[in-house]
Amino acid sequence: MKDKNQISALLGVCIIPQIIAEIKEFYNHQEEIAIKEFYKSHVFEKLQNPDTGLWHLSAKTLSQIFLAEIKEQIIEFPEEQS
């Protein structure tokens, strides 16, 4: 399991920039708004907690979950595959 510092580095360098790239179209390519809205989301709140294990999901999957949260006000995290 990764610790909080490792998760923060992984999120900041790899995952979040890719998520923002995926969702900024929804915000008419306004990256600043996309960033602001993502950081306010329930998905981000869960993502930054290492215990949830969401950091292992792809940026595409996480962006789809985020967009569902925004559009439909539902959040469904995929079951862990074994």
Image (cartoon, rainbow, N blue to C red):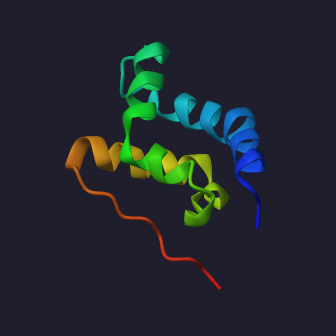
Residue 8, horizontal then vertical, whole percent: 69, 42
Query: Position of 54 compared to 78: left or right?
Result: right
**Where, by quadrant of the figure, is residue 19 drawn?**
top right
* Residue in view at x 37 percent, y 17 percent: 28
Residue 80 to residue 17: above or below: below
**Where, by quadrant of the figure, is residue 53 drawn?**
bottom right
Q: Nearer the viewer, residue 48 or 65?
A: 48
Residue 46, horizontal then vertical, whole percent: 48, 53
The quarter of the rendered structure image containing the C terminus is bottom right
* Residue at the front extreme, as displayed: 4
Residue 45 to residue 54: above or below: above
Residue 75, horizontal then vertical, whole percent: 33, 58
Residue 66, horizontal then vertical, whole percent: 40, 45
Query: Position of 32 compared to 11: left or right?
Result: left
* Residue in view at x 21 percent, y 49 percent: 72
Residue 59 to residue 1: above or below: above
Query: Position of 38 compared to 13: left or right?
Result: left
* Residue in view at x 78 percent, y 48 percent: 6
Residue 78 to residue 21: above or below: below
